[in-house]
Amino acid sequence: MHSATIGQRRYTFPDLKTLLAKATPLRSGDVLAGLAAETGEERVAAQFALADLPLSTFLNEAVVPYESDEVSRLIIDSHDKVAFAPVAHLTVGGLRDWLLSDEATTAVLTALAPGLTPEMAAAVSKISRLQDLMIVAAKCSVVTRFRNTIGLAGHLSVRLQPNHPTDDARGIAASILDGLLLGSGDAVIGINPATDSPERAHTLLSMLDDIRTKLDIPTQSCVLAHVTTTLELIGKGSPVDLVFQSIAGTQAANKSFGINLALLREARDSALSLKRGTVGDNVMYFETGQGSALSANAHHGVDQQTVEARAYAVARVFKPLLVNTVVGFIGPEYLYDGKQITRAGLEDHFCGKLLGLPMGVDVCYTNHAEADQDDADALLALLVSASVNFVMGVPGADDVMLGYQSTSFHDALAMRDLYGRRPAPEFEAWLTKQGLMDTANRIRPGELPTNFRALLPPS
């Protein structure tokens, strides 16, 4: 039992998951699930009670039962008590204050990451301002490598997302050409296929690999098919760089995606066996998003932001190259408007980086959400100032296949210019070699490099 008094009224919260839910800043998904605080006063009371909660509580009380959930078992069984020791005496509020202090340097936060559970990170985020979330995340450094190096200080990478509603090769190639000329693609050139057939995925993978090798691009490609499809393709010799999968924070939610931890382990081992990386062996690409467990009725009464943080425990055990929270994609039933999307994006980035993950954010919204491009511009700028590892590059910021609004190649270029961020170093060297950098070392396409014409298949 947890409690706090506000004025003359005492509020009680019967268990940890109720306390976490009631303390969460307002969002439509928790209201839909019947988990949100009923009043602003109750929310403040829950936040007071949460701030006074010893961190050790999270090691003794699971929000989803250990016995029935493999994600809970993973969290508890992989917890690093030695890494946790420097903060073991703190409360949630004490951890927040310490994270904001000068003592919490980049090196110290890197060492701490294995000692924090997702629920601890989620709890701290619930009592933090946006400014707090940004300051702490900016101090966290998570660097990963495959054919280039992502996450270095002062750098911003971009996923080039050339989706096409019919997977038309010429349309995809045109989008890739557009993105490369504007400096996108160092995080990954990644296609969401219109269908999940192995044959279609193989065709797209072969096309991407052909483009990469013809232009000698130091990056990685991915077709975002289901992990079982990718495993089948690896067995048939398809040119697979990264294994993609959407993941969630409960065993039941992952089951709804058709996956479990053993399957992800098999996929990682298979990808590693290909030895396609040149500067590193981070071979997994995960995507997440607040609300996925609720939409699958697999949240166990846990608020959506805490469940999202639990997905990061799944991700980090597989040492991914990229983790992307697709923050506004699921819809206004879960994050109603620009304010809620902004908060969620900064929470996810904070929790992921604090837990040791290479976080990117798809700054996005659906057309029926109460949000617009001004909201996306604001969140994008906040995330880049908080040192997000990568963002999306979508032609015109409008994904015509998935039907949602994201960020464009020009948006990413504007953020690099505004904040002085560089592409991945190997990719930047390639851009320079292609003549796509001006005398001030800015990405400014001039004449179309002759070899780029090889990108476009015959009409």
Image (spheres, grey):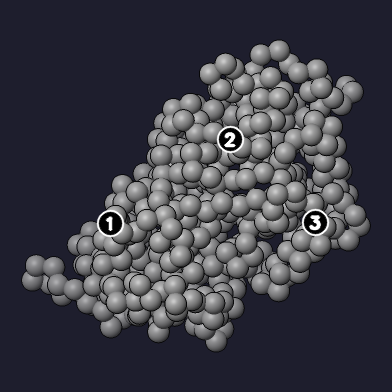
- Left or right position of 91 against 282: left
199 or 296, which lies in front? Answer: 199
Cα distance between the residues tagged 1 and 3: 41 Å
328 or 101, which lies in front? Answer: 101
Cα distance between the residues tagged 2 and 1: 30 Å
The quadrant of the image that shows the C terminus is: top right
Q: Which residue is mark 3?
A: 275
243 or 357, which lies in front? Answer: 357
Q: Quadrant of residue 396?
A: top right
Please report the residue visible at 22 percent of the width from the left and 67 percent of the height from the top. Answer: 48
Q: Tell me if label 2 and label 1 are in contact, CB under 8 Å.
A: no
Q: Secondary structure at mark 1?
A: loop
Please report the residue visible at 71 percent of the width from the left and 45 percent of the height from the top. Answer: 147
Q: Which residue is mark 2?
A: 423
Cα distance between the residues tagged 3 and 2: 24 Å
- Most extreme residue toward the bottom is 67
The type of residue carrying mark 3 is: Lys
Q: Earlier in the sequence, mark 3 or mark 2?
A: 3
- Most extreme residue toward the left is 8
Q: Which residue is mark 1?
A: 101
Please report the residue visible at 36 percent of the width from the left and 44 percent of the height from the top. Answer: 339
Q: Secondary structure at mark 2?
A: loop
Q: Quadrant of residue 42?
A: bottom left
The type of residue carrying mark 2 is: Pro
- Left or right position of 412 against 237: left
Q: Secondary structure at mark 3?
A: loop
Please report the residue visible at 42 percent of the width from the left and 60 percent of the height from the top. Answer: 109
Count residues near mark 3 (Cα–Cα under 10 Å), then give few for <14, some for 14-19, many for 20+: few
How far from the left and from the top, in percent, is residue 50?
Answer: 28, 70
- Left or right position of 316 against 238: left
